[in-house]
Amino acid sequence: MRTDSSPGSLPAREHLPAAGAGTPVLDVVVPVYNEEKDLGPCVRRLHEHLTRTFPYAFRITVADNASTDRTPHVAARLAGDLAAVRSVRLEQKGRGRALRTVWSASDAPVLAYMDVDLSTDLNALLPLVAPLISGHSDLAIGSRLARSSRVVRGAKREFISRGYNLILRGSLQVRFSDAQCGFKAIRRDVAQVLLPLVEDTGWFFDTEMLVLAERAGCRIHEVPVDWVDDPDSTVHIVRTATEDLKGVWRVGRALATGSLPLDRLARPFGDDPRDRDLTGVPQGLARQLVGFCVVGALSTLFYLLLYSGFRHFGGSQLANALALLVSAVANTAANRRLTFGVRGRGGAVRHQAQGLVVFGIGLALTSGSLAALSAATIDPDHSTELAVLIAANLAATVLRFLLFRAWVFPDPQPPAPSPEPHLPDPQRTWSDAR
C-alpha cells in the first residue's frame, strides 16, 4: 500500500483518528431554498435520529441558498435551540455552490448531505458514513437503483432517473449506479482535492464530483436505500434534466480531449487492478464492440431526436444532414475516448476529419435510402421515414466500426525489431586480404 502523497494528490485511506474535544466527526449539510414550512420538522427529526443512533459527535449545517421567504429565520432559530445545529447563508442559488462552500470550510473529517424532504430513510445514514470513518472507502452514495432498495415514486421520475444513469454509463463509462440521489458522503481529505476541480454549482455537481472521483481511483461505496418521492418537490424536472445533459456533454468532451487535470489526482492505492492488462481477460475487439455498441445506441437516439427537431424547420434531406453531422462529431469524440481509449489532444483534429469522411459515407447511405423511399412513395409519413433511417443507420454503423477500427483508430503496431549487426566472415576477410 502506498502511504506517500504528493501535493494535490489523494492520501492513502486510513481509519480516521479520534477527533479533538468539540470537533464533530460528521457534518451533515442540508441545502435549502424557500423551505420555511418543512425545514424545522425535518431538521429536528434528523437531529433526534443522530442523537439516538450515531455513536460520534456530529453537526447539522443548514445551507440557505438565497431564500426569499422566512427560511433564514427558521434556520437561525434551529441553530439557537439545538446545540449541534448551525446555519450558513449564501447570497446565490445553487445546491453545488452550497455544498462546496460548507464542505470547504468544515473541520469534520466526514462530510455528508441530504435533501431537506428526508425522502431517504435515515436508517441508511450510519451505513453510509461508516466505511468512510473506517477508511474502507472515500465516498459513499445512497442508491435507489440497487436491487434491495425500496422506492416509491411515479413512473415519470423512475424513467428519467434510470434513463439518466444509463446515459452516464454509456457516455462516461461510470460504474456507480445512482448519481442524483440526495444522500451522499465524502471524506474531507478527499473533498479538499476534488472540489476545486468541480465546475458545476447546481444539480450536476453530484455527478461531476463522482465522475472525477472514479477517474481518480477513489473507492465509492453504495448503500441501498428506502426512498419515498416527495410529491411537493420544487425541483423543475425538465430544466434539471437539460442542465444535467449539458454537464454530461461538457465533462465527456473534457475527458475526450484530455483537458481535465486528472494528472493532479493520484490513485490512493496505486494502479487500479481493473486497468491492468491481465492475461486471459478479453481485450481488443470484444471490448471495442461493446463500447461501440453503447456509444452507437446513444448516438442513434441523439440523431433521431435531432432529426425530429430539425424536421420541423426544413425538409427531410436537410434535417437528416444536420442531425447526422452533429451526432457524427459527438460520436467520433465519444468513440475516440471511450471505445478506442485514445487520450489527450494529439491527433484529435485528424480523427474528427477522418470521422467526417465516415460521416459522408453514412450520409450517402441514409440520403440514398430517403431518395429511394421518395421514389417509391409519393408522400411517406414520418414514422416510415424514421423506420427507413433506422435500417440505413444500422448498415452505416457496421461500416463505421470497421473504418474506425482499421483506419481512424488503428491499433498501434509494435516497433519492428532492429536487425542484428552484420559481422564480417573472418575466413572471407582473410581471403580478401591475401
Image: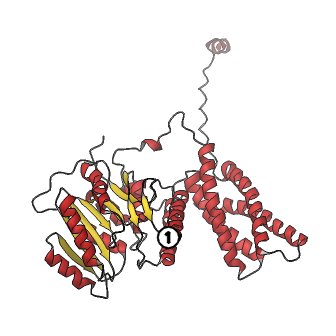
Q: Residue at x 52, y 74 (%)?
A: 242
Residue that label 1 marks: 154
- 13 or 59, which is in the foreground? 59
Does residue 174 appear left or right of residue 62 in this picture?
right
**Mark 1: amino acid:** Gly
Q: Quadrant of the C terminus?
A: top right
Q: Pinpoint residue 392: horizontal percent, then vertical percent.
A: 77, 61
Residue 23 position, x and y percent, is 14, 62
Crowd class of label 1 (few under 14; some 14 to 19; many from 20; radius 10 Å):
few
Report the front residue among 197 and 163: 163
Q: Which of these two is toward me, 403 or 108? A: 108
* Observer able to see residue 61: no
* Quarter occupied by the N terminus: top left
Q: Quadrant of residue 323?
A: bottom right
Residue 322 as seen in the image, left or right of residue 388:
left
Q: Position of residue 171 (x, y in %)?
A: 54, 60
| Placement of 67 over or under 195, stated as above or below | below
Task: Tally the marks.
Answer: 1
Above/below status of 13 relative to 62: above
At x 36%, y 71%, the residue is 96
- Judged left or right of residue 211, residue 115 is left
Instruction: Name which residue lies at 42% across and 59% down.
Output: 150
Instruction: Residue 292: tell me if it is visible.
Output: yes
Q: What residue is shown at x 58% (from left), y 59% (from top)?
A: 334
Q: Residue furthest left?
A: 21
Percent of width and height locating residue 384: 79, 70
Please tell me whether mark 1 sits on a helix, a strand or a loop. Answer: loop
